[in-house]
Image (cartoon, helix red, strand yellow):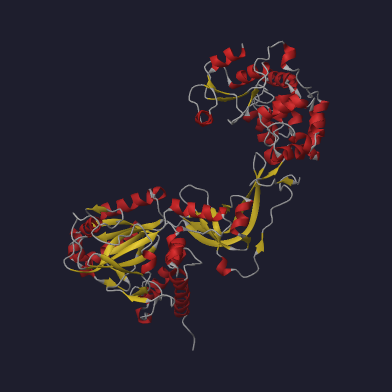
Amino acid sequence: MQIDPQRQRLEELRREINQHNYRYHVMDDPVISDYEYDQLMAELSQIEVEHPEWVTPDSPTRRAGATPADRFTKVRHPGPVLSLGNAFNTAGVRAWYDRIRRLEEDVAQADFVVEPKIDGLTVVLHYRDGLFIQGATRGDGEIGEDITANLRTIRALPLRIPVDPAGPAALPYLVVRGEVFMTIRDFEKLNHRLQEGGQRTYLNPRNTAAGSLRQLDPSLTATRPLTLLTYEIVSAEGDLPATQSEMLDYLRELGFPVVEWSRCEDIDQAIAEAQAWSDRRDQLPYEADGVVIKINDLGLDNDLGVVGKDPRGSIAFKFPAREVTTRLLDIGVNVGRTGVLTPYAILDPVVIGGVVVRQATLHNFDYIAVKDIRRGDRVLVKRAGDVIPYVIGPVEAVRTGEEQIYVPPQLCPTCGEPVEHLAGEVAWYCVNSACPAQLIRNLEHFVSRGAMDIAGLGIKIVEQLVTAGLVKDVADLYTLQKDELLQLEGFAEKKADNILQAIEASKERPLSRLITALGIRGVGEVMAADLARSFQDLSALASASFADLQTLEGIGPNIAQAIVDWFARPANQQVLEKLHAAGVWPRAEKPAAAQGSPQTLSGMTFVITGTLPTWKREDAKEFIEAHGGKLSESVSKKTSYLIFGADPGSKYQKAQSLGVPVIDEEGLRKLAE
């Protein structure tokens, strides 16, 4: 007998969904995203609508969750703890509204309440005579797990109601439904703390909260930053409010933390409010995968009843998916304009929030190692708003053993030169000054005012020179010919002459400027000036050993290694040879004393913050050095004076906290007299 393909698909979906329910609700270890789960449920529901004769009582569409775990005591709920039907767009909400309006005429005059659908773990809280006596998970909607001891550790949960004696009296017996979750900020702080301690980090706040709450040891739960918001009364002894909005007010007055909510006059206003929530989801302090639109009249809601596992009087308006799982096909590497190597994920294409995502960032190589992300992994990918998609981590539960551990490249993928990674640093670098991937950035830095100060060579002309193939490294600037420049768009005789004259004039720049221009990692203007005072020319600096460099003040092992490595690269040596041949080979400046300036600032170290009234920072630097002083970038106990101008930054506060004297521009002049 041939099996109906649709019936076969139905059975496959039921098995798959039951497995995902078990992993999500019992193991707290899902292997697909909520969005993918919703799509499976939608497909199953559609088949059952088309073939109602195939519907069975044990179908996933007829239950709210999964069977409770055996390790916890079972708790039967006093009333059904239902799930919700989903709408993925405004058309879905209107279709729901039209269905219930046909069932009950009063729906046409109904108002609504809109609440966030927090991505946490549903809990059911029992109170007897105002005291918290029991708490449970939702489980399968009828029977949950007793987690009373763990819930007591959550400070947001009131152990006695009413909290305010002046508030309304608590009913003799009250059962409240809420959501336990972890704020995004607390989740990030927890992961940071775990990472610093060398422990494994978590993928998302929902799974972390659920796993924390379902611990057998309550002391472990107590260490996690869990909180609670409530939104429903499941059962009670006594009279209850008649509307959802009144019920939320009542819960708040008793002392329960309550979800944000908005009352809307009609369905149009409710849809507009739901869309407004979607627009500001990135500003929410917690993860929310949608909002719930509820009929405010609880009597009308009760009259509408339930279909399957879903109350007819409510609908979940789901936000566009931001987290989806897909296959990591490979890991690529980009070389930035500063030489930093950045890994990225090459993905099996997947739709996230209406956008097809084929690539996602992996942050850095340490991130890959800490998260243990491997080629071939199924990974969880997130895209929030306009933020670049990024890989959260691997879904380890579905590994097959064929995944490959990733090893960072030893050679630059652009130029093939060895890359550099120093101990204690996150970044990996290509330090080849002629690397095509960073050539424009290197040239832009080389010609800048603080370096070789070649007037007229802005970023647009630099890009023209590189695109035309006229410049392949910084030294090629000094071999440019007039006829070559005249071939470029926007160049005439005068402009070409001006550029060539500016390039020629730069040959007279002092050694400190040239050292700055080379772009050695960690060597800025201040350190370049120190090096120029210690070495006669670039040949002497290139010959300096790691130990020699570390004897200089302010140079630690990482910067010393960066300098040694830069001069050791064959490509960089070729650049130096070309500069020397072009006559760009300044000798060390004469000491300031030989230039006739009194050395009144000798032995003093200065730091500048803010905007000085008449001097540019470069002017102040030259003044200080001409009088024997030294300019530093950071404030420390060794700083002699902080020079401040308008809008001083954090250096001003640090100087005050360290007791460093603070003077202005005029004070510096007087000090040098």
Q: Residue furthest left?
A: 239
Q: Residue furthest front?
A: 659
Q: Residue furthest bottom?
A: 1
Total numbered labels: 0
Please give the name of the residue rendered at 27% of the width and 63% of the height, measured from the top-left corner.
232
**Which one is in front, 158 or 239?**
158
- In the rendered view, tell whether residue 535 sits above or below residue 277: above
- In the rendered view, tell whether residue 441 sits above or below residue 616: below
On the image, the x and y values in percent for residue 433 come to 73, 37
Residue 484 in sight here: no
- In which quadrant of the rendered view does residue 568 lie? top right
On the image, the x and y values in percent for residue 233 come to 25, 65
Please give the name of the residue rendered at 82% of the width and 29% of the height, measured from the top-left corner.
539
Residue 250 in sight here: yes
On the image, the x and y values in percent for residue 282 come to 42, 49
Q: Is residue 659 shown left or right of residue 216? A: right
On the image, the x and y values in percent for residue 38 come to 42, 66
Please give the name of the residue rendered at 27% of the width and 71% of the height, measured from the top-left corner.
306
Q: Is residue 370 shown left or right of residue 407? A: left
**Which one is in front, 15 or 432?**
432
Q: Is residue 634 shown left or right of residue 546? A: left
- In which quadrant of the rendered view does residue 524 lie? top right
Q: Is residue 162 shown left or right of residue 559? A: left
- In the rendered view, tell whether residue 577 sits above or below residue 294: above
Assign the C terminus to one quadrant of the image: top right
